[in-house]
Image (tube, grey):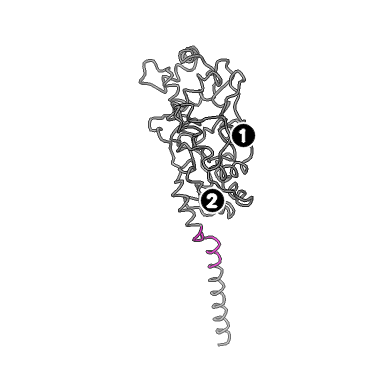
Amino acid sequence: MRVKKKISIMIKQMSLLFSIFLAVFLLNCGPSEETIKLQKKAKANFGVIPDKMPGSENDNEERISLGKKLYFDTILSENNTQSCNSCHNIEGKGGGVDNLPTSPGAFGKKGDRNSPTVLMAGFHSMQFWDGRAKDLKEQAKGPILNPIEMAMKSEGDVIKRLKEESEYPKLFQAAFPDSKDPITYENLAEAIAAFERTLITYDRLNDFIKGDHKALSKVEQEGLELFLANGCTSCHNGVALGGQSLQKVGQVHKYETKDLGRYEVTKNESDKYLFKVPSLRNISLTAPYFHDGSVEKLDQAVKLMAYHQLGKELNDNEISKIVKFLDSLTDKNRL
């Protein structure tokens, strides 16, 4: 009887230990209520990154392949030195930029504005810092004929080059089989846009929003909470965390710049100093920052934006946590 009693006690003790172990296990593995709430708030502000970009419905393998070849080809610059990738580097761990304040063109002269990333750009509601292009196709037409950038003299000169090159006639025909004369400037821009629509990146914030509560560390979650609480999402929202609106730089406190932004396009007084809100996806890869490329470090950019746009002076600890969160926006394939 004593033996049976001892066995019974041991079983109860083991059962109690197992229950405690299970509770600790579930506590450590399951998300807290705060994390679940944070996931919901993040999803409401940013959503889940889709598998395809808007406008990709008619993209096919041949068109994307042609666009990729054009994107990397220096034939589109007057002196055969400059490609789209020269200013918007996507090779290896490139963040879709050249990491220069402003970019030198085909003949060495530098532009006035920082080259924005092409990664995720198809999710933006407009293109260029001043929003002058409505989509990727319209944007692709600009740099090739820009005298400072790729410096081709006319659309006709571009088409003449492509028709004289051995590979392009058959590639354009395959990409645009219903066209009798497929090598056109419109089709060139459409092909480049089709390729750029494949430049979707996926990061740990996206994993977090989709339900992986361990995708962001504790400090990164604290940074996200600060990002939300301080009103950063008033501009940086949507799947690209930006790219959806034009905002005045220096909304609360004046930001010194000679660039008049959107005004240069419209000549409307109300458009002075309006710039497209940049995407924050892959922001850790795209220094230097702002339309003029004047800010070298991400923590400095966070501090200045909080002050100039929100009228807030964040302390070093808050800035550090927000930067940690922003680091989580880097494409997992570019880490």
Q: Which quadrant is home to the C terminus?
A: top right
Within 10 Å of disc 1 (Cα), the crowding (few <14, some 14-19, many 20+) is some
User: Which label's residue is closer to the chain start, 1 or 2?
Assistant: 2
Say above or below: 108 vs 199. Answer: above
Label 1, label 2: how far apart the Cα atoms are: 25 Å
The majority secondary structure of the magenta stretch comes to helix
Mark 2: amino acid: Leu
Q: Label 2 belongs to which residue?
A: 224
> Is residue 62 visible in this depiction of the protein?
no
The disc placed on residue 11 is none
- The secondary element bearing badge 1 is classed as loop
Residue 152 in the image, given as x and y percentages of width and height: 52, 16
Say if the magenta span includes residue 32.
yes
Q: Which residues are magenta?
A: 23-34
Residue 163 in the image, given as x and y percentages of width and height: 47, 13
Mark 1: amino acid: Ser
Q: Label 1 belongs to which residue?
A: 294
Say if the magenta span includes residue 67.
no
Residue 274 in the image, given as x and y percentages of width and height: 49, 34
Say above or below: 74 vs 29. Answer: above
Say above or below: 220 vs 274. Answer: below
Residue 289 in the image, given as x and y percentages of width and height: 59, 36
Choose between 253 and 63: the one closer to the eye.
Answer: 253
